[in-house]
Amino acid sequence: MAPTMHPDEIETDTALVRRLLAGQTPAWADLAIERVRLVGTDNTLYRLGEDLVVRLPRRTRTAATLAKEVRWLPALAPLLPAPIPVPLAEGKPAEGFPFSWAVYPWLPGERATTEVVVDRSRLATDLARFIRALQRIDTTGAPAPGEHNFGRGASLRTRDEPVRKALASVDGVAAGAVTAAWEAALGAPAWKRPPVWIHGDLDAQNILVADGRLNGVIDFGGLGAGDPAADVMVAWKLLDADARSTFRDALAVDDATWTRSRGWALSQALIALDYYTQDTHPVLVREARRWIDTLLAE
């Protein structure tokens, strides 16, 4: 078994996935199955053949996010300028696995790490176009921020307690500067306009590129309708200074939303560092520290 990252995580393996497929989607049961080494925090992924991927929720808290994707992604996909993973089949709890699970297409592309993306300004333009398109979609019936999307898009005030806790316990951060940045974000005017659709977790691991251009957006567990600052924070997580300026101009981000986006990125980094370790999620720990450095440098 691969090491788990949550105390309440359900362990899975390729044998379990094959049994689930054989019992519910037998047409795919004989395809090659391989665990995906790049790990997300919400789902365990298994590559299925060349073109498919099986996603299994890791724990009870994240089971609801998959059900939400099954409900909403088919409706959103035709309205977006880049591919997103529309579920092809939803499986039910079985074989001792307690949650629903799903089969998705495997979207081509590489994660948008600094080693892969050379022209960040071009990517900034692509991301702004994607976010604009998402924000234009009718939100009737859309889920408001809550447990299902980890509160992404809610008021920053809802994150004050876990941020203060993290500031008191996380080593290696400039506590004074970080506190000042967090309090500035809390002081920014709140979003008063109607809620808009947000992805909720735009970062290098969930953005796919090919030839330097946006080629797909994955992992919509943070999907909901709320404050757009929760998506604008990708500016601090992925882009350099010039690309951030390009992104802000292309998306026409006002001062208050820009300041709140800094708070969103800061809070996500601190909360991640307070929860994950080099053993449980080294990639996220490294990325979170880089986000904080970027925020404090400007």
Image (tube, rainbow, N blue to C red):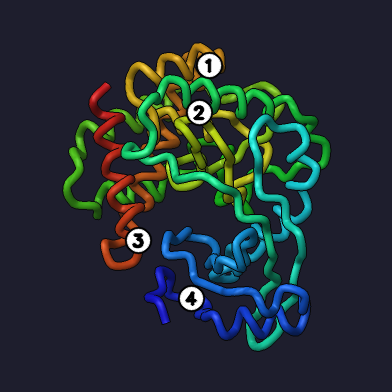
Occupied quadrant, residue 290: top left
**Is 196 displayed left or right of 182 in the figure?**
right
Earlier sequence position, callout 1 versus callout 4: 4
The residue tagged 4 is: 8
Other residues around mark 1 within 10 Å, as few (<14) / some (14–19) / many (≥20): some
- Which residue is at the front of the view, 186 or 5? 5
The residue tagged 3 is: 281
Other residues around mark 2 within 10 Å, as few (<14) / some (14–19) / many (≥20): many
Earlier sequence position, callout 1 versus callout 3: 1
- Which residue is at the front of the view, 52 or 140? 52
Q: Secondary structure beneath disc 1? A: loop
The residue tagged 2 is: 232
Residue at x-position 47% and y-position 26%: 123
**Is 88 displayed left or right of 163 in the figure?**
right
Residue at x-position 64% and y-position 34%: 82
Asked if the residue at tag 4 contacts the one at tag 2, i.e. Cβ–Cβ closer than 8 Å, the answer is: no
Amino acid on which the number 3 mark rests in the picture: His
User: Foreground mark, 3 or 4?
Assistant: 3
